Amino acid sequence: MVLVHGSGPQDRDSTIGPNRPLLDIARGLAERGVAVLRYEKRTKAHPQEFADGGSIDLETTDDAVRAVALLREQAGIDPKRVFVLGHSQGGMLAPRIAARDPRIAGLILLAAPSRPLLDILIEQNRRMAILNDGKTSDAESIAIQQLVDQVAAVRSGREIAAAQAPMGIAPAYWRSVDAVDQISEARAIAQPLLFLQGARDIQVVDADWQGWRDAFHDSPRATFKLYETLNHLAIPGEGDGNLQEYQTPGHVDATLIADIAAWIAAQPPK
């Protein structure tokens, strides 16, 4: 199994505060007999390569494909039984990774966006603005409108400076992100798909979950599992989801890990 990170300069554990979700998944799968390869994300290990913004494939896809090839070469690994698990943005790109390497045995998409990431970025900012007190301040409204304008500028195709693009990242990068059509790419591959989603996720939300379900509800190669208490990191909690809980130590839900291992074991040899 190769684990593919979400957005940002992630380490091999996808460390967020005291939590290390990819480490939890790796350990849990290893305990169940599944070998796992993790690696530092390129934006973490070699940030200088992104001075001009780079692309989504340079950030994620290319290295994931290489990681799959590397894992296949290891002693004791069945080269026909290498799977990919992508978390968040990594899940969004999992179909593209599989298209680049059709020998991949199957995909696990954990908290994976099904909609355009730039649209989700705007939605997330609107949601975070009202999360604490239910209101959007004047300053927050201005910042959100600025983001809306930046996204429109990126999508216009005209030449703009990085400062005019979301998060100050070069528009070439965002245009490569916006070109991803993950549902179409998932339809175009043949691998089995396991979709996992936490109902308390406030970053990748029900609209994304429903997008995948609508696209693959009648597909025999798709399996869906929704976990009522899990957040975006697949860590259990109570009440409405919030960003503050990412700073509370926790661990990825054992049932989710067991479900992944069981699904892998159930896949027929290729």
Image: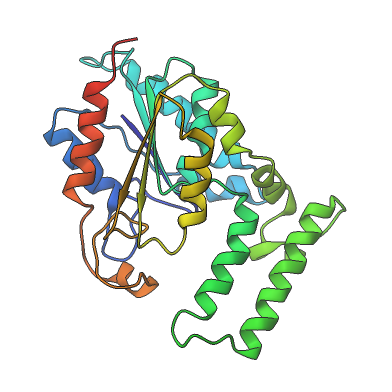
Q: In the image as oriented, which residue stretches furthest toward the right? A: 158
Q: In the image as oriented, which residue stretches furthest toward the left? A: 31
Residue placed most toward the observer, 35 or 206: 206
Q: In the image as oriented, which residue stretches furthest toward the top? A: 270
Taking the spot 61% from the left edge, 48% from the top edge, the residue there is 50
How far from the left and from the top, in percent, is residue 223? 36, 33
Is residue 221 toward the left or the right of residue 254 in the image? right
Is residue 58 toward the left or the right of residue 30 in the image? right
How far from the left and from the top, in percent, is residue 217? 46, 35
Q: Is residue 8 visible?
A: no
How far from the left and from the top, in percent, is residue 48? 58, 49
Taking the spot 64% from the left edge, 39% from the top edge, the residue there is 180
- In the rendered image, the quadrant that contains the N terminus is top left
Seen in the picture, residue 127 relative to 33 is either above or below; the reply is below
Residue placed most toward the observer, 145 or 5: 145
Is residue 76 toward the left or the right of residue 186 in the image? left
Q: In the image as oriented, which residue stretches furthest toward the front? A: 218
Taking the spot 72% from the left edge, 75% from the top edge, the residue there is 145
Residue 124 position by quadrant: bottom right
How many numbered marks have been drawn onto this rendered protein structure? Answer: 0
Taking the spot 46% from the left edge, 88% from the top edge, the residue there is 133
Q: Which colouring convention does the figure follow?
A: rainbow
- In the rendered image, the quadrant that contains the C terminus is top left
How far from the left and from the top, in percent, is residue 237? 24, 66
Q: Is residue 23 visible?
A: yes
